[in-house]
Image (cartoon, grey):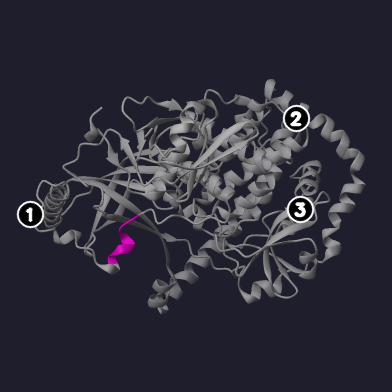
């Protein structure tokens, strides 16, 4: 094997992602650096980024004496990204635990990766950091934010007696709940095995038409008001604009296009939504080159957590063509110099780093997450976000990746359902359809499993369908979701998101068709026939779509829209209970009993003004533990202490449950 076939991995985040893939069974081998040493299969038990790697050496005890003496070794593995090889490592500690031999080494200094590289004219070498920036205007929300004093003051107080409503509801429905628990899982499973004929009913609704006319009039009024505001104060209107920035790494550049890598967890779908976009190439010396480009291809690499996007420059001017050739030539010259082929050459001015340009150079500054579980969940969110980008470019659903990530989600829930529920509140960078789908998947699986044991393939299919059920919305124009009101035509077009995602799923042969129908196709149906896309009524809907509709509606209402902030759980419960003609009351009550009146992930404020996130509930679904926070922003790694028991009681009464604005 030729040494030059390998290239070093420069990003710490990429090193961590590649090592994580080696924790899968059979993915890693250990080879001593001594002469004629052979590789041995080894198990990677645990990783702590920049700290340690933990191994299970039980199956290769014969290597222990040499490893104890400090003989170095390398880790070898293979992923979709290519062959992996670590720099030389050595064991630092050994532990005998329950008959197993465990050992720890320091975090490797680096990894080398052997992979096929694309053939572009100018390929950037390791250490040649050039950033690529894309920007998209975030929709302006004309509403009071949850964090404002006005919003806090307007919140309805939720005292302890309100929390006790859960207990009263449990007592009133105890016998009914036992009966449901005994048979509900069997009903859902049975419905996945035999699908009945769906009788489609078309009902004309005068009320809907009347509302559509009213909405249209409101929208025109809003548009007129907006025009007047911008005309009278255009500078203020420009200042109020907010932009979402996506930073990537330039990998290759030619006179006609470029290849850029984005970190999958950075929310690429918020920016790469159209075939044509403007990007800015940002060089270390502060030079910024803007150019309009067409997205030509998108490729996801779940192992490396990377989204590779190929851009073709659109109609560059003669001046832009001249600049591009200069950049290509300078990149080639710098690449030759740093490779040792021209050390006597003067460094390219483009690559002389200026301090104020550093922020534009690396995509992987490393996202911060409140908990390890949130970090695990973010990997799935990153996959879904990348999948949405691929869908917008006309690609089909990646069946294998969907299956693998559905399995990972089930493992996360099985490890600690409460940590998983809190982790949902920490995921916010991705598209709202991704975050919502992931939340619905976790809660739907959790609620379904609470009703009885279900086959693994059924619950996995439920998770997969829930994760992607709204991704079709990302294939529609963003103007539909930014509008506070919709015309009837726009509303009908919005409903086409179901058809759009179904059309991209013919590759997912492993998914039971009845699960696809029950969740993706029927989650937006309502008992009275007012839902979409088929206007089904109660007799057409089984237990699974009824349950899914409740979970979907509660989660959707808890998130902000263009015309309102996110609602509290109590408000969503009240809304559903007041609309039992739309939603199955049995599943509404089951949801409240299972997740509680103030569920995990709620942001609460105590009488003292202290803010906290709910992280644990007791068996009666009362608050058991909270983690303190100083603001209403999404939970990050700077959260305060966890408080429970008597310390929780000392915090006093709950003053308010706050809606969130993300």
- Which circle, 3 or 1, is nearer the viewer? 1
The answer to which of 302 and 243 lies nearer the viewer is 302
Residue 245 lies in quadrant? bottom left
- Calculate the distance from the C-alpha at mark 3 to the C-alpha at mark 1: 66 Å
Residue 528's spot in the image, x, y percent? 74, 41
Verify whether residue 281 appears in magenta: no
The residue that disc 2 covers is 453
Q: Is mark 3 on a helix, strand or loop?
A: strand
Split into 4 quadrants, where in the image is the N terminus? top left
Residue 183's spot in the image, x, y percent? 82, 29
Split into 4 quadrants, where in the image is the C terminus? bottom right
Residue 344, numbered label: 1
| Cβ atoms at labels 1 and 2 below 8 Å apart | no
Q: What element carries label 1?
A: loop
> In the image, what residue occupies the spot 60% across and 59% down?
214
Q: In this view, does 246 lie above or below 508?
A: below
The answer to which of 195 and 223 lies nearer the viewer is 195
Residue 9's spot in the image, x, y percent? 33, 44
Query: What main secondary structure does the magenta stretch of the protein show?
Result: helix
Q: In this view, does 421 lie to the left or right of 271?
A: right
Mark found first going from the N terminus, 1 or 2: 1
Q: Can residue 524 be seen in this view?
A: no
The answer to which of 24 and 528 lies nearer the viewer is 24
* Region of the chain picked out in magenta, as a range: 357-362
Residue 541 lies in quadrant? top right
The residue that disc 3 covers is 617
Q: Is residue 120 left or right of residue 278?
A: left
């Amino acid at each position: 094997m030729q040494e030059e076939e390998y290239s070093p991995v420069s990003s710490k985040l990429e090193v961590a992602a590649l090592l994580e893939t080696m924790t899968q069974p059979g993915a890693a081998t250990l080879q001593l650096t001594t002469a004629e040493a052979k590789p041995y299969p080894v198990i990677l038990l645990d990783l702590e980024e920049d700290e340690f790697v933990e191994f299970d050496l039980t199956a290769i005890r014969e290597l222990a004496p040499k490893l104890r003496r400090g003989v170095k070794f390398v880790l070898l593995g293979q992923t979709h990204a290519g062959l992996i090889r670590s720099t030389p490592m050595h064991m630092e500690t050994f532990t005998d635990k329950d008959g197993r031999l465990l050992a720890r080494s320091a975090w490797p200094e680096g990894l080398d990766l052997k992979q096929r590289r694309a053939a572009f004219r100018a390929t950037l070498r390791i250490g040649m950091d050039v950033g690529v920036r894309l920007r998209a205007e975030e929709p302006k929300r004309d509403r009071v934010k949850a964090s404002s004093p006005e919003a806090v003051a307007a919140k309805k107080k939720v005292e302890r007696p309100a929390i006790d409503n859960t207990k009263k509801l449990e007592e009133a429905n105890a016998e009914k709940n036992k009966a449901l628990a005994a048979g509900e899982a069997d009903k859902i499973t049975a419905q996945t095995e035999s699908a009945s004929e769906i009788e489609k009913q078309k009902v004309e609704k005068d009320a809907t038409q009347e509302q559509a006319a009213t909405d249209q009039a409101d929208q025109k009024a809003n548009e007129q008001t907006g025009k007047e505001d911008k005309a009278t104060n255009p500078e203020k209107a420009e200042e109020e604009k907010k932009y979402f920035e996506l930073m990537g790494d330039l990998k290759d550049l030619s006179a006609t296009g470029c290849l850029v890598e984005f970190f999958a967890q950075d929310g690429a779908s918020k920016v790469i939504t159209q075939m044509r976009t403007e990007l800015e190439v940002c060089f270390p010396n502060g030079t910024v080159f803007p150019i309009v480009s067409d997205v030509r291809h998108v490729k996801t690499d779940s192992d490396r957590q990377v989204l590779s996007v190929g851009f073709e420059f659109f109609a560059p001017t003669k001046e832009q063509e001249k600049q591009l050739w200069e950049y290509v030539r300078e990149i080639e010259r710098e690449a030759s110099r740093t490779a040792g082929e021209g050390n006597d050459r003067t460094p390219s001015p483009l690559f002389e780093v200026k301090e104020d340009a550093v922020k534009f150079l690396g995509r992987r500054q490393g996202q911060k997450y409140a908990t390890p579980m949130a970090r695990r969940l973010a990997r799935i969110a990153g996959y879904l976000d990348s999948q949405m980008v691929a869908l917008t470019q006309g690609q089909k659903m990646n069946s294998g990746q969907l299956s693998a990530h559905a399995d990972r989600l089930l493992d996360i829930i099985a490890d600690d359902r409460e940590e998983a529920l809190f982790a949902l509140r920490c995921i916010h960078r991705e598209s709202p359809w991704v975050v919502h789908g992931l939340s619905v998947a976790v809660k739907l699986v959790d609620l379904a499993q609470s009703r009885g044991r279900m086959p693994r393939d059924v619950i996995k299919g439920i998770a997969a369908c829930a994760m992607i059920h709204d991704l079709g919305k990302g294939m529609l124009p963003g103007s539909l979701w930014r509008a506070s009101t919709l015309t009837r035509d726009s509303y009908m077009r919005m409903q086409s998101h179901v058809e759009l995602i179904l059309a991209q799923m013919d590759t997912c042969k492993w998914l039971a068709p009845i699960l696809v129908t029950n969740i993706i196709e029927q989650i937006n149906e309502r008992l009275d026939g007012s839902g979409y896309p088929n206007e089904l009524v109660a007799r057409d809907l089984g237990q699974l779509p009824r349950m899914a509709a409740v979970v979907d509606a509660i989660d959707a209402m808890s998130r902000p829209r263009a015309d309102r902030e996110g609602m509290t759980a109590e408000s969503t419960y009240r809304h559903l209970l007041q609309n039992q003609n739309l939603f199955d009351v049995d599943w509404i009550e089951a949801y409240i009993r299972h997740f509680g009146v103030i569920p995990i992930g709620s942001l609460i404020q105590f009488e003292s003004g202290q803010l906290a996130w709910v992280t644990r509930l007791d068996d009666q679904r009362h608050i058991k533990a909270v983690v303190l926070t100083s603001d209403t922003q999404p939970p990050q790694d700077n959260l305060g202490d966890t408080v429970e028991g008597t310390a929780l009681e000392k915090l006093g009464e709950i003053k308010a449950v706050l809606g969130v604005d993300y």
